[in-house]
Image (cartoon, rainbow, N blue to C red):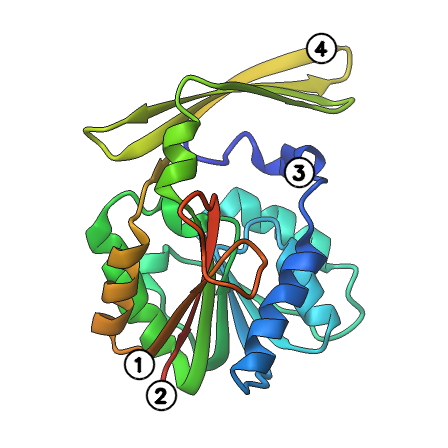
Amino acid sequence: MSCYEALADSYDGLTQDIDYAGMLQFMQTLLQQAGKQPKTVLDLACGTGSMTLLLAQQGYEVIGADLSEDMLTEASQKLMQLEQNHPLLICQPMQELTLPQPVDWVVCCLDSLNYLTNPADCKQTFARVYAALQPGGVFVFDINTPYKLKGLDGQTFLDENEDTYCVWRAEFSEEENSVFYGMDLFQREGEHWLRSFEEHQEYAYCPKDLQQWLLEAGFKSVRQFGDCRLTPPEDTEQRIYFLAVKE
């Protein structure tokens, strides 16, 4: 089963602990420090639209893009609560990103970039994001670090609520430089439980490589930050934020 096909309608219920508002506040602080006041924003790999919704509620003109039609269906339903300022949703892979018009800001949250398991696709995504930005535009994204992904090897996790039970196991492959998550998903349907399986893969990108590829894509200013901290990342950082500016 393709990534997020079965998980889409259970994703929000299993990830209620994600602090989207805190992430947005941190990214806005980065923008303030960079002297940027964007009005238009692309939520790249927007998933079920939780960040898209917050951005629209704060008055940004928003586009949400994601590869998964199932996740975009969930996003569309969530965004119906907006009385005005409705975002545009588009179904596109990151490495083929094409917007109707350039934006001031591109965000890509929750290690979505790690799901690009081919470095060539990552480089192409950086080029596409650069082209999608207005001059002076900003690209902010985060990654799971190699330190974190390698540390997941052999671990088993459980997420559950009243209607969903998800057991997932992580295995890191040195040959693939990736962690593989095998997810057994049990979803309640009336009196019965339906079982499905998904496999997710995240590539362990070296932050130095990402820094270099951003510069090669044309970005002139690239900075790295610790997890929601305004200081540089540490060696044992599990999540790193990047801020790249198109001059």
Disc 1 to disc 2, C-alpha distance: 6 Å
Q: Is residue 25 above or below residue 228?
A: below
Q: Are marks 1 and 2 in contact (CB under 8 Å)?
A: yes
SS category of the residue bearing label 4: strand
Residue 25, horizontal then vertical, whole percent: 67, 66
Which residue has dot 2 on it? 247
Identified at 22% across, 32% down, the residue is 176
Rendered image: mark on residue 192: 4
Identified at 24% across, 57% down, the residue is 209
Identified at 47% across, 19% down, the residue is 155
Mark 2: amino acid:
Glu
Identified at 60% across, 84% down, the residue is 39
CA neighbours of label 3 inside 10 A, class few (<14), some (14 to 19), many (20+): few
Q: Are marks 2 and 4 in contact (CB under 8 Å)?
A: no
Label whose residue precedes the other's in the sequence (3 or 4): 3
Q: Nearer the viewer, mark 2 or mark 3?
A: 2
* Quadrant in the rendering for residue 71: top right
SS category of the residue bearing label 2: loop
Label whose residue precedes the other's in the sequence (1 or 4): 4
Question: Is 120 on the left-hand or right-hand side of 146?
Answer: left
Label whose residue precedes the other's in the sequence (2 or 4): 4
Mark 4: amino acid:
His
Mark 3: amino acid:
Thr
Disc 1 to disc 3, C-alpha distance: 35 Å
Which residue has dot 1 on it? 220
